[in-house]
C-alpha cells in the first residue's frame, strides 16, 4: 500500500514511515497561473517487498495531461515488485530496467496523448 500525491495540486503534503526508512515527506502544489490541472504524481511505498525489505519512491512528471501518469503511477511499482520476486540470476539494476521497459511497452495500450518522465528510488536492505 502506497501514498500518492497527485491531482488535487492545491498544496498537498504527506509524511510516511516504513521498515526501511525513518521518514519521507512529499509536497505537491500546482501553480494555477501556469496550469489548469495538476499533471504530476508522487508515490511513497513504505514496503514494496517484505523479504528483503524495500521501499519505493517515485515522482512522475506528466506532460499534456494526467492520462499516462494515472496508469504508470501504480503499474511501474507492480512490475518492479514482480521483477524483484523473479527467481533468476539478474541483479537489482537489471530488474529495475526490465520493470521500466515492461511498463513502457504496456503503456502503449493506454489511449491518451499525454506523456511522463519518471524518477524513482528503491531503498533495499540486503
Image: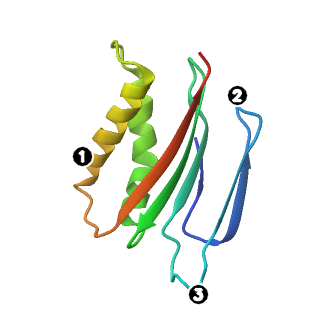
Q: Secondary structure at mark 2?
A: loop
For the C terminus, which image quadrant? top right
Pointer 1 residue: 105
The disc at residue 19 is 2
Q: In the figure, is residue 41 to the left or right of 62?
A: right
Pointer 3 residue: 33
Which residue is rendered at x = 42% and y = 27% of the image?
A: 93
Give how far apart the Cα atoms at labels 3 and 2 are: 40 Å
Q: Position of residue 98 (x, y in %)?
A: 32, 33
Q: Name the front one of labels 3 and 2.
A: 3
Give the mark nearest the N terminus, 2 or 1.
2
Within 10 angstroms of label 3, few (less than 14), some, or many (20 or more) residues? few
Which residue is rendered at x = 49% and y = 48% of the image?
A: 119
Whether residue 102 is situated above or below residue 13 in the rendered picture = above
Whether residue 112 is situated above or below residue 47 in the rendered picture = below
Give the mark nearest the N terminus, 3 or 2.
2
Q: How is the image coloured?
A: rainbow
Q: In the figure, is residue 59 to the left or right of 98?
A: right
Give the mark nearest the N terminus, 1 or 3.
3
Which residue is rendered at x = 32% and y = 44% of the image?
A: 103
Q: Secondary structure at mark 1?
A: helix
Q: In the figure, is residue 57 to the left or right of 71?
A: right
Q: Position of residue 109 (x, y in %)?
A: 22, 55
Amino acid at each position: 500500500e502506497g501514498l500518492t500525491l497527485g491531482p488535487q495540486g492545491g498544496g498537498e503534503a504527506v509524511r510516511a514511515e516504513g521498515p526501511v526508512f525513518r521518514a519521507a515527506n512529499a509536497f505537491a502544489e500546482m501553480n494555477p497561473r501556469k496550469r489548469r490541472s495538476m499533471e504530476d504524481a508522487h508515490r511513497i511505498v513504505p514496503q514494496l517487498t517484505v523479504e528483503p525489505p524495500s521501499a519505493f519512491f517515485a515522482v512522475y512528471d506528466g506532460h499534456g495531461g494526467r492520462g499516462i501518469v494515472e496508469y504508470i503511477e501504480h503499474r511501474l511499482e507492480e512490475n518492479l515488485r514482480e521483477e524483484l520476486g523473479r527467481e533468476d540470476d539478474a541483479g537489482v539494476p537489471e530488474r529495475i530496467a526490465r520493470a521500466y521497459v515492461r511498463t513502457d511497452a504496456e503503456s502503449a495500450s493506454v489511449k491518451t496523448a499525454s506523456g511522463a518522465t519518471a524518477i524513482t528510488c528503491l531503498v533495499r536492505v540486503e
